[in-house]
Image (spheres, rainbow, N blue to C red):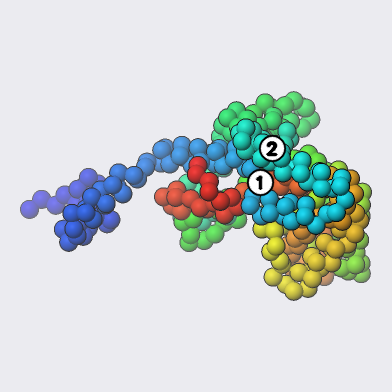
């Protein structure tokens, strides 16, 4: 008897190895499931389209938690001017969705924080397809052209360039899933960004002073109410990355460390007391929240950084499994 199992077309498919033991209905289901499986090229095209559509969508519709917070702060403010500004913000969001256009003319520089499993089938293609997705979204959404090559000082006209979109990676061993946080870093909310290293003797009072100094000098420029991300680590780059990741957390979440969580509360109260109000026109609430992310540090240094999200905090979070089935956690009722 000639053995043919070394030929790929004659090998048993593990997914259908028990096909002689199941019902006709189950056989049909298995056949349909196999038909849906795509080759690598088709998978890349599919994921590119999903991400382009997702980028376009978050530019037009705010995350559920941000919309809820805007409504909450609008109710809490009592000055006529503050209430009028919040009404305008909500009308802007309504029209952006109805007219299918970006909710802010500054659609930012695209940034992605990718938490990808080592067994995710498109891990090697991911960075390239994210760039392609940004180009696709730029012309389909459309998005404002915001990628200017430094030193040469020309706009690429498609929102990609050297190092843009920015992709931050977290690799997850033995996982076949991929989480992607998408963020539009606009000019106004990027402007207050700052990092430095404090002497250890300055302690957490120094961290507080640093954050409050940033808020009192540049907070006005970032279109309040703000989401303030604070990173505490050893050096400027580690603190800065943590402060960016802090902006991806859902509103209402808190640092796992109870002391850090308490500091989040204190900073939120302190920044609110500045009285920036909506759009910096004065009011009781200056921030939607303060999020701190931290790591261990060198005994001789305290790295601290601040990143800010504006009231139109355009972030999205999507999770893919190995078959590119997806779940969106930031926006409900979305089909890509």
Residue 274 vs residue 320: left or right?
right
Q: Position of residue 61 (x, y in %)?
A: 63, 43
Residue drawn at 7 percent across, 53 percent down: 1
Question: Number of callouts in the render?
Answer: 2
Residue 153 vs residue 99: left or right?
right
- Mark 2 neighbour density, 10 Å: few (under 14) some (14–19) many (20 or more): many
Residue 241 vs residue 269, the one in the foreground: 269
Residue drawn at 79 percent across, 71 percent down: 262
Residue 286 vs residue 255, the one in the foreground: 286
Residue 64 vs residue 326: left or right?
right
Residue drawn at 60 percent across, 55 percent down: 170
Which disc, if any, is residue 184?
none
Q: Can see residue 12?
A: no
Helix, strand or loop status at disc 2:
loop
Q: Position of residue 74 (x, y in %)?
A: 78, 52
- Mark 1 neighbour density, 10 Å: few (under 14) some (14–19) many (20 or more): many
The quadrant in which residue 290 appears is bottom right
| Residue placed furthest toward the bottom | 258
The residue labelled by disc 2 is: 103
Q: Position of residue 36 (x, y in %)?
A: 34, 44
Q: Can see residue 146?
A: yes
- Confirm or deny contact between disc 1 and disc 2 (CB under 8 A): yes
Residue 99 vs residue 121, the one in the foreground: 99
Residue 182 vs residue 155, the one in the foreground: 182
The quadrant in which residue 26 appears is bottom left
Instruction: Identify the mark nearer the N-term, 1 or 2.
Output: 1
Helix, strand or loop status at disc 1:
loop
Residue 88 vs residue 179: left or right?
right
Which disc, if any, is residue 62?
1
Residue drawn at 85 percent across, 54 percent down: 78
Disc 1/disc 2 C-alpha distance (Å): 9 Å
């Amino acid at each position: 008897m000639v053995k043919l199992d070394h030929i790929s077309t004659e090998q048993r498919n593990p997914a259908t190895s028990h096909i002689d033991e199941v019902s006709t209905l189950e056989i049909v289901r298995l056949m349909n499931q196999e038909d849906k499986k795509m080759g690598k090229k088709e998978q890349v095209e599919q994921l590119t389209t999903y991400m382009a559509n997702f980028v376009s969508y978050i530019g037009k519709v705010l995350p559920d938690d941000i919309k809820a917070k805007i409504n909450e702060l609008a109710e809490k403010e009592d000055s006529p001017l503050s209430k009028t500004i919040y009404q305008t913000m909500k009308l802007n969001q309504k029209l952006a969705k109805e007219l299918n256009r970006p909710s802010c003319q500054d659609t930012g520089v695209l940034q992605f924080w990718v938490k990808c499993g080592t067994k995710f089938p498109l891990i090697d293609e991911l960075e390239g397809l994210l760039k392609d997705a940004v180009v696709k979204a730029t012309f389909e959404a459309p998005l404002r052209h915001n990628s200017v090559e430094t030193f040469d000082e020309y706009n690429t006209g498609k929102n990609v360039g050297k190092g843009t979109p920015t992709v931050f990676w977290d690799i997850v061993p033995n996982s076949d899933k991929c989480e992607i946080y998408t963020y539009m870093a606009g000019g106004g909310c990027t402007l207050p960004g700052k990092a430095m290293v404090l002497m250890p003797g300055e302690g957490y009072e120094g961290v507080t002073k640093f954050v409050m100094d940033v808020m009192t000098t540049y907070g006005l420029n970032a279109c309040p109410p703000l989401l303030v991300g604070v990173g505490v680590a050893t050096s400027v780059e580690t603190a800065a990355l943590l402060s960016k990741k802090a902006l991806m957390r859902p509103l209402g979440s808190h640092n796992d460390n109870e002391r850090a969580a308490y500091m989040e509360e204190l900073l939120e109260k302190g920044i609110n007391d500045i009285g920036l109000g909506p759009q910096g026109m004065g009011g009781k609430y200056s921030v939607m929240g303060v999020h701190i992310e931290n790591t261990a540090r060198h005994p001789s240094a305290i790295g601290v950084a601040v990143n800010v999200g504006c009231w139109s905090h355009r972030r999205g979070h999507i999770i893919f499994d190995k078959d590119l089935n997806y779940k969106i956690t930031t926006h409900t009722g979305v089909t890509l």
